[in-house]
Amino acid sequence: MRRPFNRALHATLSGWLVGMLAVGPAAAQQQHVSLRLMPRTLPAAAGPRVAVVAIPVDASLEGEALALTHWAEQAVARSGRLELVRLTDALDAQGASTRQEKAVEGNAAFKDGAKAYDELDTVKALQSFDKAVKAYEQSDLSRAFPLLSRARVMKAATQVANGENKAAELEMRGVLAVDPRATFNPNYFPPEEIAFVEKERKAQLEGAQATLNVRTQPVPAQVFVDGTYKGVSPLTLTGLTRADHYVTLVAPGFAVTEGRAREGDASFTLTKLPVQQRYAALVERIAKNPDDEERDQALQELGVLAGVPQVLALVVRGGPGNAPLTVTGLRMDVADGHNQAYALGQVPRGDAMATGSEALLTGLVAQDAARVNGKPVKHFSSGGGVSRQTAGYVLLATGVALLAGGIYFGLEASSKADAFKTAPQGSSRADDLKSTGKTYALVADIGVVLGLVSAGAGSYLAFYKKGGGSSSSAPAPTTSERATPARDAKAMDKALPMPPPPPAARTEPAPKANAASTPAAEAAPANTPPPPVFDPPPQPPPSQPARKMTRKEREAEAKRQREEAARLKHEEEQRQKEEEARRKHEEEAKRKADEEAKRKAEEEAKRKREEEKKRPKLDEDDLRNY
């Protein structure tokens, strides 16, 4: 009786052991896949949608403006209170929707693959992960590259589970070639494959000596390589692995362009969007009128064109060399032009732009400015000086006063002339009247001429084009260090979070500066609200001794003034040419219309004559018979 019992007990224990061996890895796989390998979608910000645009006043600053646009978008994404809408996507709704659909398709395929892997259906899992990889490759890889890398890792894991070790090693080598820091979890790879990964990773990092030259036509573009922002084209990248890298190019007014490129030269041609011409015209208007009402009107039109309720605009100015950029930043409500935020600041160029612009950009998104008596707050003057309209009113009033004075002295001169005619000739009184009359007449002539000139100039400045100073009584902030950057990165859209900027790009300054600033940043609590951005107490500028300009500086200033005068002259000539071309076009259209009307009238008359000819004539007999 013991032997059958022992056999049954052994069979039960064996079945239980086999079941535990099968359930253990499955449970581990389920936990890891659901917590680490599924693409995580961060919650989108609940605030209003904001598009960022940077406008260079000088065309030579176009690359610097594009770079500043990227860091401003990062500031909006970090704020947690605003939802970023990349301007390129806003102007290309159809293309953005297609890329979004591919990202959603990749997420769904990845989820199906993870589920099949949990159920030990590795054949179906491999098909799903391969579908996810292909879908992610057609999405926006400036955001979706981390998801593409994870999908390729799971594809390799599934190939290992299917016994396709050679194919898995090829896939792992391809992943490490473009993402050397990709994670391969031991829960999905046996020790020998993990050893292969570490060996291949070391080889890729040691052999990362390739150089890639990225060029774009017809305009510069933001360059993302393997999902990481690298700068603005034309751009030379060094220290890359020798592999086909994923290159994504972004420029407002042009479609997002993606491709693969190895070391050497890579040239890309960007495709214009249908709205590119209108977008370029709005940017040109802002660049020509960076400090008056025309700027805000153009920004409102740009917001309507992009379909966003707010626009974060950065007007970029800069001198020669490596001098810091002067940036005027404002965040505008498109509906009524209210400036939700406004700030002026200096931003360094090059690699220091990421950290040097952080305080200014964070201040623009930290909080909203209140309206004054229910009216929108606007800022038209950059330096607090006299505005165009105010100067026009002053000149107009001065001209009126001079005209009145000229008329008065003219009447006095006429009166002296009448008295001179009645006075005895040759007397002292006649000589006095003659001298005084000439003086009054001269003063009258000068007053009338100057009054007409002043009144004309004042009328032009005050009424020809609306401009002016700030309509807000609140002082504009003038410092760029009023708010600490938010710590938590937030999502920009529902399907794909924007990866935060790489630490290397954000910690470019010298190690001493980082060592001094990092503890302070870490000591600040994460939930501490940023200090107010608006209405700072006025601080008088520190008195500085006047410095005499050197000869080189005077020559540079004179050269700059000559270039500015030449630019204004060229713009005026261009405007006159455009007016002339428009006038000729209108005259030609009118002439064609007159000729067409004349031709139609002649055709109508000819038709009537032909009808008259064809109509039979009635003789007298016909008339009598009738």
Image: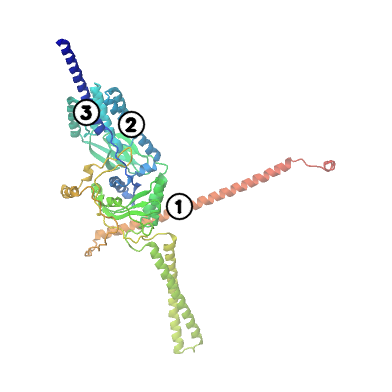
Circle 2/circle 3 CB separation < 8 Å: no
Near-viewer residue (604 or 463): 463
Near-viewer residue (577 or 455): 455
Near-viewer residue (123 or 33): 33
Residue neighbourhood size for the residue with mark 2, other residues' Cα within 10 Å, grouped as few (<14), some (14–19), many (≥20)? some
* Secondary structure under the numbered disc 3 in the rendered image: helix
For residue 622, what is the image quadrant?
Answer: top right
**Residue depth check, mark 3 versus mark 1: number of the one nearer the observer:** 3
Which residue is pictured at 40% across the width and 45% down the height? Answer: 307
State whether residue 66 is above or below residue 11: below
* Secondary structure under the numbered disc 1 in the rendered image: helix
| Mark toward the start of the polypeptide (3 vs 1) | 3
| Residue that label 3 marks | 28
| Residue that label 2 marks | 108
Residue neighbourhood size for the residue with mark 3, other residues' Cα within 10 Å, grouped as few (<14), some (14–19), many (≥20)? few
| Mark toward the start of the polypeptide (2 vs 3) | 3
Across and down, in percent, residue 86 comes to 34, 43
Residue neighbourhood size for the residue with mark 1, other residues' Cα within 10 Å, grouped as few (<14), some (14–19), many (≥20)? few
Q: What residue type is labelled 1?
A: Glu
For residue 37, what is the image quadrant?
Answer: top left
Relative side of 6 to 342, left or right: left
Across and down, in percent, residue 49 comes to 35, 46
Callout count: 3
Q: Which amino acid does label 3 sit on?
A: Ala
CA distance for labels 2 and 3: 22 Å
Q: Which mark is residue 548?
A: none
For residue 98, what is the image quadrant?
Answer: top left
Q: Residue 578 carries which label?
A: 1
